[in-house]
């Protein structure tokens, strides 16, 4: 009953304080991206991208051309918009150079003034330029969630477009008459991955790896068509992002958490459990039969051994005593007994008495020099072989010692 009354009083006190504190605190509102994102206005999240790189041509007969001679320049200029952190689109102009081989002398892009390859293939060089459109998916935001300020994003895209084929025309004397429209429009589909790296809020650098499949180009004035061909390209690009660049997140209220009695209840329950545990331990202790206590001689804090007839401490034993002195000096409220021994199996009584005294006094001096108060130490001399008397004369060396014990 007393516990219930105390608990009720404590709860009333805490709830009263919580009510006052809650009245004093105001509800705040914050933008929280973890709650999702809101679609921005149509004029937001636009960007422009310029890119340049190189393409590698795959087509019929192209395998007979040197690999190093199959690379051509490629470029693009696009404007685009992200409709959400995941989905976006872009449109623009794509330029792609192609270098291939044809077995037809008057095929599109054939260079009549260049030597044939393997005696049966004519070198081709064409420039393709035209509009393109891509649908884009930001894989990083899709898989990892939108996070403002992220440095790296991986963007997958798929798109299509059209190319107008440009070729060089040559005069009868073999001189170039410049680039002209080959009157050969082709379709293309493409897909790729853009690796973008944000260097600031406005600018991002990118590495675009793209595969393009292009409809077959005209071979000879409508008389035939070449096989469809492909190109693998790599681009380095720079993107400028117009305001607004980030996405608005839902604004959610942050309310101050009211204080309650849960913590007090938990502490009270823990105290009850502890009391019950102590009561059980006490009951078990009272019901346990009394055990016969066997008195045991306390072990020395340390025992220092000496050679026969020697009372001076060795360097090693001196270090041991210094270490013991550090321990004793930290327990200034305790008393210690320094006892000197000498074996009774060798020497005369007078010699052994002197050895016991000199050994004990020597240990005391080292202790005092290393910070132990003289008042903590009591020096005694033991003229028995009580340490190892049961072992006999064969263990006499174990009685040439000094022990330090707590009183």
Image (spheres, rainbow, N blue to C red):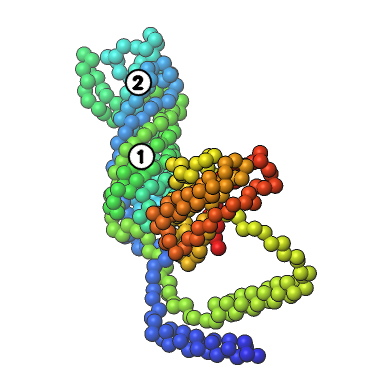
Dot in front, 1 or 2: 1
Secondary structure state at the residue bearing disc 2:
helix
Query: Could you tell me which residue is drawn at 46 percent across and 53 percent down?
Result: 361
Query: Could you tell me which residue is drawn at 37 percent across and 39 percent down?
Result: 208
Query: Could you tell me which residue is drawn at 32 percent across and 38 percent down?
Result: 236
Q: Which residue is mark 2?
A: 68
Task: Work out whether 33 lies above or below 232.
Answer: below
Q: Quadrant of the N terminus?
A: bottom right
Whether residue 303 is visible:
no
Task: Decide if residue 166 is on the left or right side of residue 226.
Answer: left
Query: Could you tell me which residue is drawn at 59 percent across and 76 percent down?
Result: 266
Whether residue 376 is visible:
yes
**Residue 328: percent from the left, percent from the top?**
47, 58
Mark 1 or 2, nearer chain start = 2
Q: Nearer the viewer, residue 67 or 371?
A: 371
Residue 256 is tagged as none
Task: Decide if residue 151 is on the left or right side of residue 382.
Answer: left
* C-alpha separation, residue under disc 1 versus residue under disc 2: 22 Å
Q: Residues within 10 Å of mark 1 (few under 14, many from 20)?
A: some
Q: Which residue is mark 1?
A: 207
Q: Quadrant of the C terminus?
A: bottom right
**Residue 36: percent from the left, percent from the top?**
45, 63
**Residue 274: percent from the left, percent from the top?**
64, 74
Task: Work out whether 258 lies above or below 384.
Answer: below
Q: Nearer the viewer, residue 146 or 50?
A: 146
């Amino acid at each position: 009953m007393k516990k219930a009354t105390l608990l009720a009083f404590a709860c009333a006190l805490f709830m009263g304080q919580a009510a006052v504190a809650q009245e004093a605190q105001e509800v705040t509102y914050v933008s929280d991206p973890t709650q999702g994102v809101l679609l921005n206005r149509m004029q937001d999240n636009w960007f422009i991208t310029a890119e340049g790189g190189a393409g590698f041509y795959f087509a019929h007969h192209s395998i007979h051309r040197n690999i190093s001679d199959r690379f051509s320049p490629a470029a693009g200029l696009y404007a685009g918009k992200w409709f959400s952190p995941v989905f976006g689109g872009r449109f623009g102009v794509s330029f792609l150079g192609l270098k291939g081989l044809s077995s037809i002398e008057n095929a599109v892009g054939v260079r009549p003034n260049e030597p044939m390859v393997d005696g049966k293939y004519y070198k081709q060089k064409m420039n393709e330029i035209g509009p393109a459109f891509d649908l884009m998916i930001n894989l990083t935001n899709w898989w990892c969630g939108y996070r403002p300020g992220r440095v790296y994003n991986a963007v997958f895209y798929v798109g299509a477009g059209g190319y107008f084929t440009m070729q060089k025309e040559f005069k009868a004397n073999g001189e170039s008459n410049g680039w002209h429209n080959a009157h050969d429009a082709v379709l293309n589909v493409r897909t790729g991955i853009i690796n973008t790296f944000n260097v600031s809020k406005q600018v991002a650098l990118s590495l675009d790896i793209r595969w393009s499949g292009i409809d077959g180009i005209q071979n000879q004035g409508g008389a035939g068509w070449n096989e469809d061909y492909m190109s693998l390209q790599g681009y380095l690009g720079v993107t400028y992002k117009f305001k607004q660049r980030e996405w608005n997140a839902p604004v959610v209220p942050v309310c101050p958490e009211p204080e309650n009695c849960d913590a007090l209840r938990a502490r009270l329950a823990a105290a009850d459990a502890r009391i019950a545990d102590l009561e059980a331990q006490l009951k078990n202790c009272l019901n346990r039969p009394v055990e016969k206590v066997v008195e045991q001689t306390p072990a020395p804090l340390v025992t220092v051994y000496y050679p026969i007839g020697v009372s001076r401490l060795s360097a090693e034993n001196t270090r041991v005593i210094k270490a013991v002195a550090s321990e004793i000096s930290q327990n200034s409220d305790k008393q210690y007994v320094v006892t000197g021994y000498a074996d009774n199996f060798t020497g005369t009584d007078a010699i052994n008495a002197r050895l016991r005294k000199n050994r004990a006094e020597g240990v005391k001096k080292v202790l005092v020099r290393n910070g132990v108060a003289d008042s903590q130490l009591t020096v005694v001399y033991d003229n028995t072989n009580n340490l190892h008397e049961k072992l006999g004369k064969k263990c006499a060396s174990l009685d040439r010692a000094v022990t330090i014990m707590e009183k």
